[in-house]
Amino acid sequence: MADADTATGAGTGPEPEGDVRLAVSGVGKFFGSRLVLRDVSVSARAGEALLVVGGNGAGKTTLLKIMAGLCRPSAGTVDLRVAPEASAYLGHATFLYPRLSAQANLLFWGRMYGFAPSQEAIAAVLSRVGLSRVGDEPAGTFSRGMAQRLNLARVFLIGPKLVFLDEPGTGLDPASQDLLRREIIALKASGAAVVWVSHHLNSDLPLAERVLFLKDTRAAYFGPAEGFDAGGLTC
């Protein structure tokens, strides 16, 4: 693996202004006296997936939350170049309402984003994630894989231009993981920028255009996915 001095930004070149959906510059983060991130600069571009990788405790989730505006950095800037309602965040928790049906959950989330999705739109996204047959059932009865599929449907419903995914494949069965990867490809094809924290390097790396590797609080690599050597990385 190339070192940080040669790898950060390697091969990226000047970025067309219109392609960049998110630009992070010199971001650092302390929790009390503990340094979590130091001088991290990275960007996310339309139609591409940025894979964020690193060992446990490397600061991946913290950085994703800073990017999404859910956590303030201690230093540096975050330039979000899409409207807040055009971005979506999918984390470890699904934030589904267990007593509401799948359809009702989607209707609620649509209204939270300022629009009332039609029954046709709700049916379409449920079909997209393979949940058409359980649309009337309470979300609290769903398995982990089904709940995460419904969470994905919530993301698709708003047609986001920027998507943050924090280990979305955790706890999913193989079929659900395959669906997730197909939908990430579809999100890129729609022109969305995808920032994706993953522990499944072997299967997920081929779907990414660029990689950010966090190590020892810094960006040890930020560049093309095809130039990234994951050898020795333990997540």
Image (cartoon, rainbow, N blue to C red):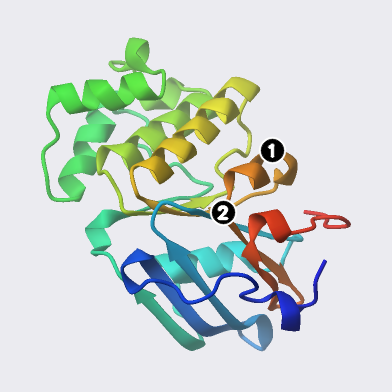
Q: Residue 63: x percent and y percent? A: 55, 69
Q: Are marks 2 and 1 in contact (CB under 8 Å)?
A: no
Nearer to us in this view, 190 or 153: 190
Residue sitting farthest toward the right: 232
The Cα atoms of the two marked residues, 2 and 1, are separated by 14 Å
Seen at 29% across and 28% down, the residue is 100
Nearer to us in this view, 30 or 80: 80
Seen at 45% across and 29% down, the residue is 149
Say which mark, if any, is on residue 209.
2
Q: Residue 34: x percent and y percent? A: 68, 83
Q: In the rendered image, which residue does mark 1 sit on?
A: 203
Q: Residues within 10 Å of mark 2 (few under 14, many from 20)?
A: some
Q: Is residue 141 visible?
A: yes
Q: For this view, does 225 lie left or right of residue 154?
A: right
Q: Residue 98: x percent and y percent? A: 37, 31
Nearer to us in this view, 17 or 231: 17
- For the C terminus, which image quadrant? bottom right
Seen at 48% across and 88% down, the residue is 76
Say which mark, if any, is on residue 224.
none
- Is residue 29 depicted above or below 124 in this figure? below
In terms of image quadrants, where is residue 71? bottom left
Which secondary structure, mark 2?
loop
Q: For this view, does 85 lie left or right of residue 186?
A: left
Q: Residues within 10 Å of mark 1 (few under 14, many from 20)?
A: few
Mark 2 or mark 1, which has the lower sequence index?
Answer: 1
